[in-house]
Image: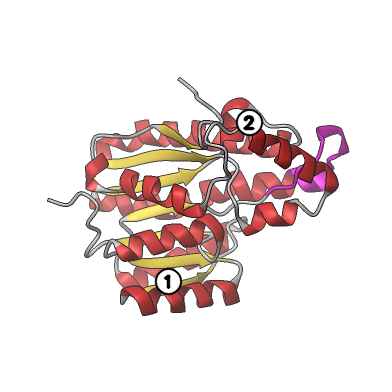
């Protein structure tokens, strides 16, 4: 049996329009899943769906979703259930950050970072879990960050929010193991994405990110395609006895025991 065969399965991926999310959507579609792309960037999401649909032949649904709004999340999840009838896999990938020293941040920045990176995960889990519990099956993979595991210069609020995602995920894993629902976490390191490219417009961020590359043992930036296979594995039957775990995909930048 192929543990990575997702034929007949439905995956919901937040932030799936670009970057790591886009690679995750493609990986699930290539493995046979039908995929819902939940994103606030509608045009990019539609373009991603058209491209992946054309190359894989899978059904892809674009769902408008602002993860900071519980109402938007619930509406989007209802749309997925109406279209596909179920959600087997939830991947919480939507995220946002700016690299700024803590004392130069503002309450507005705190709120945005926490709302997207932490409350967004709470919202989607709150919306999807009742369906998974009723079916007594499901897999959730939450995307955190190595910043959550070891800290990161200029990312105090982001690191804190992503650390909260890890603790939240482990708690859900314990609470819902009896429901045969697995919850795991993937922590990417520095990865070449549109978000990182945007952050590099700032001189301070550019210096920090440039210095980080030199500390990566494998001597290169991560690519979205480096992250997607680990997400696919954790969501698959091959990982059926794995829950509550945190896996870094960072080229060895962090080696946490």
Q: Residue at x 74, y 32 (%)?
A: 153
Reading the image, the residue beneath label 2 is 215
Of discs 2 and 1, which sits in the foreground? 2
Q: Residue at x 46, y 44 (%)?
A: 142
Identify the image's colour scheme: rainbow, by chain, secondary structure or one colour. secondary structure
Mark 2 Cα-neighbour bin, 10 Å: few <14, some 14–19, many ≥20: some
Mark 1 Cα-neighbour bin, 10 Å: few <14, some 14–19, many ≥20: some
Which sits in the foreground, 16 or 137?
16
CB atoms of marks 2 and 1 within 8 Å:
no
**Magenta part of the chain:** 97-110
Reading the image, the residue beneath label 1 is 79
Q: Residue at x 45, y 37 (%)?
A: 169
Does residue 150 show up magenta in the picture? no
Label 2 sits on a secondary structure element that is helix
Which sits in the foreground, 27 or 107?
27
Q: Residue at x 25, y 59 (%)?
A: 6
Q: Quadrant of residue 8?
A: bottom left
The quarter of the picture where the C terminus appears is top left
Label 1 sits on a secondary structure element that is helix
**Mark toward the start of the polypeptide (2 vs 1):** 1
Q: Identify the residue at the far left of this view.
A: 1
Is residue 58 at least partly visible in the picture? no
Q: Which x, y percent locates residue 119?
A: 59, 46
Work out how far the residue at label 2 is from the one at label 1, CA to CA, in angstroms: 44 Å
Q: Quadrant of residue 201?
A: bottom right
Q: Quadrant of residue 152?
A: top right
Q: Which x, y percent locates residue 170?
A: 43, 32
Q: Which x, y percent locates residue 78?
A: 42, 67
Which sits in the foreground, 91 or 147?
147
């Amino acid at each position: 049996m192929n543990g990575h065969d997702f034929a007949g399965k439905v995956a919901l991926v937040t932030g799936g329009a670009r970057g790591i999310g886009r690679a995750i959507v493609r990986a699930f579609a290539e493995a046979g899943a039908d995929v819902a792309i939940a994103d606030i960037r509608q045009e990019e999401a539609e373009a991603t769906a058209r491209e992946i649909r054309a190359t894989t032949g899978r059904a892809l649904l674009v769902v408008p979703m602002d993860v900071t709004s519980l109402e938007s999340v619930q509406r989007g999840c209802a749309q997925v259930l109406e279209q596909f009838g179920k959600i087997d896999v939830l991947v919480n990938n939507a995220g946002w950050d700016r690299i700024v020293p803590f004392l130069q941040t503002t309450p507005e920045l705190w709120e945005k970072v926490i709302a997207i990176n932490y409350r967004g995960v709470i919202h989607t889990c709150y919306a999807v879990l009742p369906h998974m519990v009723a079916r007594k099956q499901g897999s959730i993979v939450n995307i955190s960050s190595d910043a959550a595991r070891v800290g990161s210069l200029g990312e105090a609020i982001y690191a804190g929010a992503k650390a909260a995602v890890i603790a939240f995920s482990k708690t859900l894993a314990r609470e819902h193991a009896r429901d045969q629902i697995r919850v795991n976490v993937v922590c990417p390191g520095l990865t070449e994405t549109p978000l990182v490219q945007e952050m590099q417009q700032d001189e301070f961020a550019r210096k920090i990110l440039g210095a980080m590359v030199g500390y990566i043992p494998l001597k290169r930036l991560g690519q979205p395609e480096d992250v997607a296979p680990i997400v696919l594995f954790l969501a698959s039957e091959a990982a059926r006895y794995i829950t509550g775990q945190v896996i870094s995909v960072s080229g060895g930048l962090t080696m946490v025991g």
